[in-house]
Image (cartoon, rainbow, N blue to C red):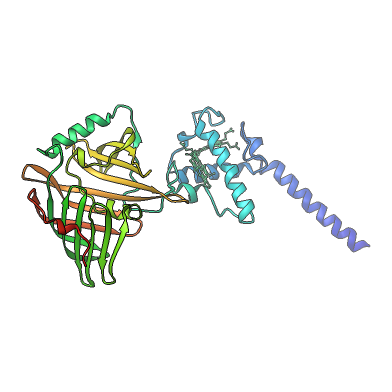
Amino acid sequence: MRSAYGILFLTLSCLGGAIAYTGQDAPLAEQQFKNIQSFKGSKASDVIPAMQFMSASLKVDCDYCHTKDRASDDLETKRTAREMIALQRDINKRNFNGRNQITCATCHGGHVRPVNLPPVTGLEVRARRNATVNADDVLKAYGKAIGTVPANGIESLKLEGTCTMEGEKSKTEATYAGSKFAVAIHTSKGDQKMGFDGSLVWFGGQYGVQKVPLEHAIQYVNSHLVFTGPDSLPKLTGITGGIAKIDGKDQQVVMGATADKSRVTLFFDKATGLLSRVMFTYPTSLGNMAQINDFTNYKKVNGVQIPMKIASHSTENDAIFEFKSAKVGGAVDAKTFDAPK
Ligand code: HEC
Ligand code: HEC
């Protein structure tokens, strides 16, 4: 009996000590701060490290959620952060035994708005809506900048140079006429060819020729598009204007949707008026995928500005086309765009 009382006494004295410790040296968050809801019951000393964690996860400073009075709930971001803390706790409780597995950092990854697309080079550039950017003006300026393009577009465009993929640089030729095109990349493993004859997309390589209806291969078609004036751009509805910066250069942005429900974002260099980037996003049942084409090194050929460098980025690969020669105009043999036999 004596030993049992002894244990009870020990336990009580330890608890007493712990309670005394909590009361005196480790105040609760709500005892030290004025407006605590999410961190009720936590140690006061846990609050500021949690603040630092949130700031770091979203890559923002304290003022993103706070006015001078940290206790004030004036900012919507602070109120949203409370909901997010509840969301994080709920996800981890339901799925990860309460471990902090999914956190602000997992979803936000250094952004205020989480990225919900698989990684693609260039995706870090976000266009922000801006009511002062008028799409018609931007497209008119683009038409003027690109040169003397007839209303129905240029008849044809032939480009020759190299394509760099997975560290290998290969000779490349590409021919365009209207919406049709044919591209040949001569890799060390053999020729990779792709084309669009106006109705079918075809791929030719080591394993023979494959023909695919356009709706199943829009991504591949878009990854090869070159634009030569406002009329050659995708036809968009629900257009809004925006601004962005690419490599430090101000961009005017035109965003909209195509008939096939892809979203298209066109970035025009504010200084030159020329198209510098096109981003396509395609819906899947689980989320969107992106394709980004960058156009640089514009060179005037027969009065038309042609991008001599095109970087094509997707979730699958990055292909950098560097063209050494461009031929604008002139008839093209119609067979150029047919699938090889
Ligand atoms: C993402 C939003 C967000 C960021 C960034 C943020 N806070 Fe907070 N902060 C909150 C929320 C939400 C609360 C309320 C917590 C609660 O309800 O328990 C809070 C509460 C506080 C409090 C308690 C105020 C009171 O008296 O009730 C202080 C102090 C504080 N933050 C300081 C900071 C500091 C310092 C930083 C920068 C290192 C910071 N916060 C960054 C969202 C944020
Ligand atoms: C499971 C993923 C997920 C987690 C975890 C998460 N967030 Fe979010 N958060 C989102 C999404 C998605 C949005 C955008 C919602 C929208 O746009 O409607 C968002 C939006 C926000 C916003 C509003 C941004 C704005 O300006 O519109 C804030 C602030 C925020 N989160 C803070 C946090 C903080 C702080 C944490 C950690 C405590 C956190 N989030 C954890 C997914 C998450």
| 113 w.r.t. 219: above or below | above
Relative to 45, is 277 on the left or the right? left
Q: Quarter of the image holding residue 40?
A: top right
Relative to 4, is 201 on the left or the right? left
Relative to 180, is 238 on the left or the right? right
Q: Nearer the viewer, residue 315 or 208?
A: 208
Relative to 164, is 59 on the left or the right? right
Q: Nearer the viewer, residue 268 or 301?
A: 301
- In percent of width and height, residue 1 lies at 94, 62
Q: Nearer the viewer, residue 164 or 111?
A: 164
Q: Identify the image quadrant of the C terminus.
A: bottom left
Q: Residue at x 60, y 42 (%)?
A: 86
Q: Residue at x 10, y 43 (%)?
A: 304
Q: Quarter of the image holding residue 10?
A: bottom right
Numbered-mark total? 0
- In percent of width and height, residue 332 lies at 11, 54
